[in-house]
Image (cartoon, rainbow, N blue to C red):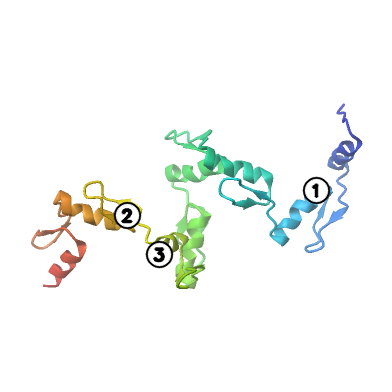
């Protein structure tokens, strides 16, 4: 026999047996057994996110989601992949990671039938069909399909160059620029003509050569 120290805890517990739902959402008419659950549900309509991370100021509608998020900052990783033993901070991240091993791609584009391992990958892909560019630069108002592209673009305005050559200390906005620069130091010529086997340091030089 289950017992409770407070009467309202007993009342809440009894709802699990009676199925009674007296608290109704005024927006979508969905009903709930407890007022607290209704309050949480209402945040899906209002967009309210009262739980704030004290490290990065990101906000969440549920405290449990905030608790999971804070693992990102603490570096704590308690969930392990059973195949490659890689560690993750959240269980859902393990599930997504496992698709690398299984090849599962459950998220399918309804336009071209291309499939993806993650829902976010599908969302980003669909913008190639819709032309949607939801990320806007606050300085020049240029639009981008992907948030990562906006972040890179913003460095033009801020002057930030996070990718630094460890040989001459020259810095670059993008990782690709640093890789191309380092060929100057290494002398590598990774771009080879398929006709005469002549090699080039830069892809553009190979393209020009192929036209001749």
- Label 2 CA crowd tier, 10 Å (few <14, some 14–19, many 20+): some
Among all residues in the image, which is located at the extreme right? Answer: 7
- Viewer-side label of 1, 2: 2
Residue appearing at x 47%, y 48% in the figure:
104
Label 3: state its secondary structure.
helix
The x, y position of residue 95, in whole percent, is 52, 43
The x, y position of residue 96, in whole percent, is 50, 46
Q: Which residue corresponds to mark 1?
A: 36
Residue appearing at x 16%, y 65% in the figure:
205
Quote the CA–CA distance across marks 1 and 3: 44 Å
Q: Which residue corresponds to mark 2?
A: 175
Which of the two discs, 1 and 2, labels the residue nearer the N terminus?
1
Label 2: state its secondary structure.
helix
- Label 1 CA crowd tier, 10 Å (few <14, some 14–19, many 20+): few
Which of the two discs, 1 and 3, labels the residue nearer the N terminus?
1
The x, y position of residue 159, in whole percent, is 37, 61
Quote the CA–CA distance across marks 2 and 3: 13 Å
Which of the two discs, 2 and 3, labels the residue nearer the N terminus?
3
Residue appearing at x 56%, y 49% in the figure:
56
């Amino acid at each position: 026999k289950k017992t409770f120290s407070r009467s309202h805890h007993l009342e809440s517990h009894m709802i699990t047996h009676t199925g009674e739902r007296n608290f109704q959402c005024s927006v979508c008419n969905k009903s709930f057994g407890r007022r607290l659950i209704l309050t949480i549900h209402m945040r899906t309509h209002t967009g309210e996110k009262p739980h704030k991370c004290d490290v990065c100021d990101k906000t969440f509608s549920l405290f449990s989601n905030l608790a999971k998020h804070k693992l990102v900052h603490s570096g704590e990783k308690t969930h392990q992949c059973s195949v490659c033993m890689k560690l993750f901070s959240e269980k859902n991240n393990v599930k997504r990671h496992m698709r690398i091993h299984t090849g599962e791609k459950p998220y399918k584009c309804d336009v071209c039938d291309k499939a993806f391992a993650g829902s976010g990958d599908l969302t980003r892909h669909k913008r190639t069909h819709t032309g949607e560019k939801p990320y806007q630069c606050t300085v020049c108002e240029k639009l981008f399909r992907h948030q990562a592209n906006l972040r890179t673009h913003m460095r033009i305005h801020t002057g930030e160059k996070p990718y630094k050559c460890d040989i001459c200390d020259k810095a670059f906005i993008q990782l690709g620029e640093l890789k191309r620069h380092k060929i100057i130091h290494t002398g590598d010529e990774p771009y080879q003509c398929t006709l005469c086997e002549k090699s080039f340091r830069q892809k553009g030089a190979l393209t020009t050569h192929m036209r001749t």
